[in-house]
Amino acid sequence: EDGVVDLTGATESPPRPLAPVSAKREAGTASGAPAKKKPKAAPAATTKTGRRRERQKRNADVRSGLKPLPTPIVDFDAEAARGMLTLTREGVPVHLPRARPPYRSQLQVMDGAIRAVRAARSALLESPTGTGKTLAALAAVLAWQRQHAHDTPTRVVWVARTHDQLQHAVHEYKRSCPYRPLMSLRLSRERFCLHPNIATAPNKAEACEEATKIRKPSTKKSKGCAHLDKAERIGYPQGKKWRPHFRLGGPMVVWDIEDAVKEGKATHVCPFHMAQDQIQEGAALIFITYSQLVDPVIRRAGGLDAVLEDAVVVVDEGHNLPSVARDAASYEVTEDRLADMVKTLEEFAPHLGEYPEAQAMLESLIAPPPG
């Protein structure tokens, strides 16, 4: 990682070749009339199933590392910056609102953050509540990112404990910073999903996977997700028409939860998958929660391992991180649940005869304790 800043508060199939002219004539009717041409099958990426497979393969390739992420996109609003205060901290020009000079503690946070990022080291930065450490850290790391955008483009990942804290960071960024890297706000389906059935499901992640998986025509049990279907059909957000929508000058250059949901309802697309797709479009500023950072299952499922590689990671309210890490590494299970699991494994073990190593490992897990 380039730096961790901890803020503490206290393939498509080719079309079938056409038959030779002679073969066409032989296939004609008895009267010599040529046979009717069969319509060509649509390329895979122009069908709903083809588009879904393309999405799934793209996501799988990113998670596995087969497909590298694109170069981070870093923009800057020069017009807004002209009306702001410019301070040079540790050799980096940092832009801040002109309305109020920064506190001394903010200058110290900026200096510490820039030094840590430059040296690829970690820093623990403490500042009293209400002294503007969120703005100071954001402005500092984004200013450093902009200064090095041409030689060593780097992603900035902002981590907060709750969705509300991420919302606060986004609002502070929108209101007080002229830096405009392509952004992504990675929140849960509870906040983003527009599907009426998924939004009320007890397990929204499972319901979303069920609604968006590829189905055979003969086994369809539901209509799937119309929002994701349309997003894939119109190329949202990765199509040429939509890319400027999220860049400097576009209406979604900075967006929060309400903006994404409003946009999703107006365009009838999926905000949750839009936020995911922005990563593969070159997002350079990514907002995530603690669990997406420290829980390996959640992190890998979201394809964030590649995002965090060589990234600048800023953890807001870092004193809460140890308890979240403990929870992520803990697992609670009842004796009855363990007994059910052992019974299932005992039934499954005999079917692994062709895989002796796997069978031995499984039997060792369910073997009774000695004595």
Image (spheres, rainbow, N blue to C red):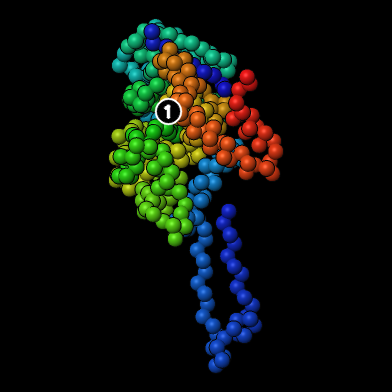
- Residue at left 52%, top 69%? 40
Label 1 sits on what residue type? Phe
The C terminus, quarter of image: top right
Seen in the picture, residue 126 relative to 206 is either above or below; the reply is: above
What count of labels does the image hold?
1
The x and y percentages for residue 351 are 62, 43
Q: Classify 10 Å Cα crowding around label 1: few (below 14), some (14-19), many (20 and above).
A: many
Q: Residue at x 61, y 28 (%)?
A: 367
Against 10, residue 260 (above or below) is below
In the picture, the quarter occupied by the N terminus is top right
| Residue drawn at x 40%, y 47% as measured from the top left | 211
The relative height of residue 265 versus residue 145 in the rendered view (above or below) is below
Tell me the SS state at disc 1.
Answer: strand
Tell me if residue 189 can be seen: yes
Q: Which residue position is annotated with label 1?
A: 287
Residue 209 or residue 166, whichever sits in front: 209
- Residue 338 percent across, percent down from the top left: 50, 28
Can you give x and y, in whole percent of width and height, for residue 110 in the image? 45, 13
**Which residue in the rendered view is the most extreme toward the front?**
371
Which quadrant of the figure has residue 255?
Answer: top left
Q: In this view of the protein, which residue sits in the foreground, 242 or 45?
A: 45
Residue 237 visible (yes or no): no
Q: Position of residue 224 (x, y in %)?
A: 38, 51
Residue at horizontal 51 percent and vertical 46 percent from the top: 56
| Left or right, residue 105 beside residue 313 | left
